[in-house]
Structures are given as structure tokens and as C-alpha cells.
Image (spheres, rainbow, N blue to C red):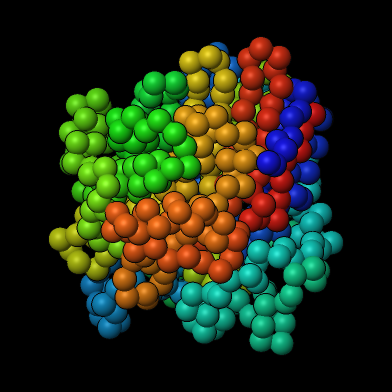
Amino acid sequence: MSETPVFSTAAVAAPHMLAAETGQTILAAGGNAVEAMVAMAATIAVVYPHMNGLGGDGFWLVREPKGRVHALDASGPAGSLATIKRYRDKGYDSIPPRGPDAALTVAGAVSGWGLALELAKALGGQLPRDMLLADSIRLAREGYRIGAAEGRNPLLEEAALFAAPGFAEAFLKEDKLPPAGETRRSLKLADTLEQLAHTGLADFYRGDVGREIAADLERIGSPITRKDIETYQARVVKPLSVELKHSTVYNMPPPSQGLATLLMLGLFHRLDVKQGETPEHHHGLIEAAKRAFAIRDKVVTDPHELTLDPASFLTPAVFEKEAAMIEARRAAPHPPRPADGDTIWMGCIDKDGLAVSYIQSVFWAFGSGCVLPATGIHWHNRGFSFSLDPKSLKALEPGKKPFHTLAPGLAVFNDGRVLSYGTMGGEGQPQILGQIFTRYADFGMALADAIDAPRWLFGKRWKEPSATLKVEGRFDPSLLRALSGYGHPVEELAKPYADMMGHAGMLVKHPRNGRVEAVHDPRSDGGSLGL
């Protein structure tokens, strides 16, 4: 049994303790949950660069104490020069994952911070911007210790990553990533953050910082133009939601795969599984995920190009129909799901009950690998999700947003509890979210136990020939034998805690006494702190 940390009034959870410390500091100074999260987002963009950065995207779910839920889409579109013809003329059959041609979408995260601060102010926030960014600036300038997770797993397309413009100078030492614990400084990034603190976050797009970003992107051959950056703005969107027997669960609309996380929960609850950690529990989630992904892949695209309403799939009729297709003791065939992607999720709930679920990413570890020399920003490779097939739902077009794996979760229980939860894990995020949510919400596990318990992912790693049900090495052998007997291709991992199973976190505010339970993943370098 793991002990869940409990805080009197407010708490944060993050995959790096320096980000958690920043959030705790802002809460202690009187900041609200949104202000704390902006500060945490800036800090973790510095100290966890393999997972996220200023050159990436983000998605926000924010619930006011009186019940209103806000969703902020801070994902960027493809650049004006990012055409299928451009990539075909260069000899590509698909979007490359590393280098300048992978740096093809605008980075939306910083615009999302700005939009979030507008919301924070409307909700009573008063802390100055330089205070919110102070920790990130100090850590970038004075240095931070490299986290253990950064060098733990092999890097995909490592040679191309190391050869990307600016990467070696920013991140390598003697042609290798430095070991955990060594100090890294990012002086150019510190200057950029200081400029944003003084002049405003919009400077990233429409000021001196934006001009330097655009010039560097043009210099390395990215298809993003100055106008693409100048005209970008994060936007408020309507969250998706589903009503379950005990709660209402929220997630993001397209281009996020939030639809899949809600479909998975809706389908699973129609199976009426009675006991957790049984073959029925895990088989039901696996099969629900397969059917959810099949719907997702027919629906989710750029929000301006949707031909089907995502909310129309989150109905009792759809859940009944899809759940009826799940066989109780037989695994269905399904196309393999890639399980790659690096991301951070963080949560915060303040003393007033304002709750935030936030996710920020550069997609693959270190993104495109391109580090812009004038600003020290490393750019994401989210555009790798595009297809060069013009008939595909994910076909590349200038101004179009790519499919997004990012899917932050938030739930409000019928008894008044508010849950902020999420994970990293690429396309596997819905599977991880389904496991931790049902363990807590349906089967009564404590938060820490729900996060600590072994996980599985159905999918395949980069360039693996076929999909398997990958499981951490702590499951009951009898459960694995049962799943194998149902037809699941079980692959037991040597690691008891595997990074590919996500860095997840959960926070719950209790209405009776105002206390907040908060926990972050033992698979990460983080934890929870509070007041």
C-alpha cells in the first residue's frame, strides 16, 4: 500500500519536483491555480526539455469552484509553406520525425499561457508576470540538475536528432547526453524568458522574440513563416464530456484525442465490471480502447475540417451499441497503436477549489531536435502526425492542425469531489487514463495505489513489426495467463516501472473538509506539494 499525500487546502502535482516547488511557491504567495500552473509550465519547460518546452503545444482544462469548465486549445497549425508537394519534391514518402522538415507547425504553448493568465485575472489573479516566470529564468541561467528520466530510454532516430541544427550545442557533451545529476544551463533560453516576463507573452509571436524565432526557422529551412507566427492565437473551445454513473468526466475536443478517453470510459461502464484488478477489468478496458480508437481515427482531425460531431459519439446509444460488440473472453483484432511520445502533465487545485489539468509537449523526446540559436528554444515535431496522402483524414495542409495525442482529464463526482488527472504516453494516453481512473473511481483504490499499480499498453514501439499487450512486471501471473487465454499477445516487460507506461498524476479536492489529495508518478522525477 502506498500512502497518498494529503494537504489542508491546496496542492500541485508535477513530473519534476522543481516544477512542483514553483507551484507551491505561487500558491503560498496568494496565486490561484491557473497562475501557479503558468509558473509551473515555464519551470518545467526549462528543466524537462526532453518532454516539453516553449517550442511545443499545450491544452488546458480549468474548472471554476462554481462549476464552469473552460478548455483552452494551445496547439499550432502547419506553416504556410508546409505542403504535400514540398515534401514530395524533397523525396519524402512521409513526414520526417527529426530536423528542420519536422519543425513544421507553430508552437502554441506560450500563447496558451497568455490566454490562461487572462482567465486567471478574470478569476481574481493578481500576481505579476515576472514573479510567475522567476523560477524558470533563474534555473535556466544558474543551472539545474538533469533528471533521471531524460537519459533512461533509447532515443528514437537518435542520429538524426543529434544532427539537427543546434541540438549538439544545446544538449550534448562529448557527443552524448550528459548523465543524470549533471548541471545544465540554458542562457539563451533564460534571456528569452526574461524578455517575455518584461514585455509580455505575446512577444513570443508578435514582438522581438517572434522575429528572432521566425528568422531562425527560415534560416534552417522550416516551412513556418513570420506571418504564421504573428497571426497565431490560442483559443477557448468547448470541452467534451460524458456522464458516468458516479461522475461527469471532461476532456479536450479535436484536434486532441480526448474523444477516445471519454469513449473508452463510456464503453467500459456499459460492461458493468464488478471487481477491479481482474481479467474482466483489464480485458474490458483493452477492448473498450480498441473500439474507441477505431471511432477516433474516423473523426479526429483539424477542428475546422470535422465532418462528424465528436459529441454525437458520447451518447448512451453509441455506448450500448459499441459495448455490445465486445466479447467477454475474446480479444478482438485491431490495427496496432504506436506507443511513442513524450509529454508532461501537471495538475493544481487551490484553496478555493479552482482546478487545473494541463498538458504540454514537444511530441517525441526533444521534438524535432532543432534548437533556435537566438532564443535557445527547441522546436517540436508535432507535424509528424500529418500524412502525405491527400486522401487521408490527417493529410498535410498549410494552416491545418495535426492530430494531437495530448488529452488532459478532469472529473466532477456526484458527491462533490473534483479530480484533476492526466499522463504522458503518446497515443497510449487514453489507455493509461482508463486504468488510473477506473482504479480510483470505480474500484476504490487510494490515489497513490492507483498511480503506483502496474500498467499495460496495447501497441507497438517505433518500427516494431507487430503490436503486443505490453505489461509491467508486477502483475499477478494468473491475470496475465487469463488475458493471454483471451487472445491478448502479452509481452511482459523486465522493468517493474516503465517510462513508456506514462508519468501520470491525480489530485482530488474533497468538498467536506477542503483537503486535497495529490500524487504524481513514481516513474517520473516529480511528486506533489501543497499547503
Residue positioned 67% across, 74% down in the render: 171
Q: In the figure, 268 relative to 316: above or below?
A: below
Q: In the figure, 482 relative to 158: above or below?
A: above
Q: Relative to 485, is 64 on the left or the right?
A: right
Q: Relative to 30, is 211 on the left or the right?
A: left
Residue that lies at the very extreme toward the right in this rendered image: 142
Residue that lies at the very extreme toward the left in this rendered image: 391
Q: Position of residue 343 (x, y in %)?
A: 54, 55
To which quarter of the image does residue 246 belong?
Answer: top left
Which quarter of the image is occupied by the C terminus? top right
Q: Relative to 134, is 202 on the left or the right?
A: left
Q: Position of residue 328 (x, y in %)?
A: 26, 42
- Residue 512 in sight here: yes
Which quarter of the image is occupied by the N terminus? top right
Residue positioned 71% across, 22% down in the render: 515
Q: Position of residue 38 (x, y in %)?
A: 65, 40
Q: In the figure, 430 relative to 229: above or below?
A: above
Residue positioned 71% across, 46% down in the render: 527
Q: Which residue is at the front of the view, 374 or 176?
A: 176
Residue that lies at the very extreme toward the bottom in this rendered image: 174
Q: Position of residue 181 (x, y in %)?
A: 79, 68
Q: Which residue is at the front of the view, 524 or 215?
A: 524
- Residue 217 in sight here: no
Q: How many labels were placed on the picture?
A: 0
Q: Relative to 517, is 144 on the left or the right?
A: right
To which quarter of the image does residue 141 belong?
Answer: bottom right
Residue positioned 34% across, 63% down in the render: 489
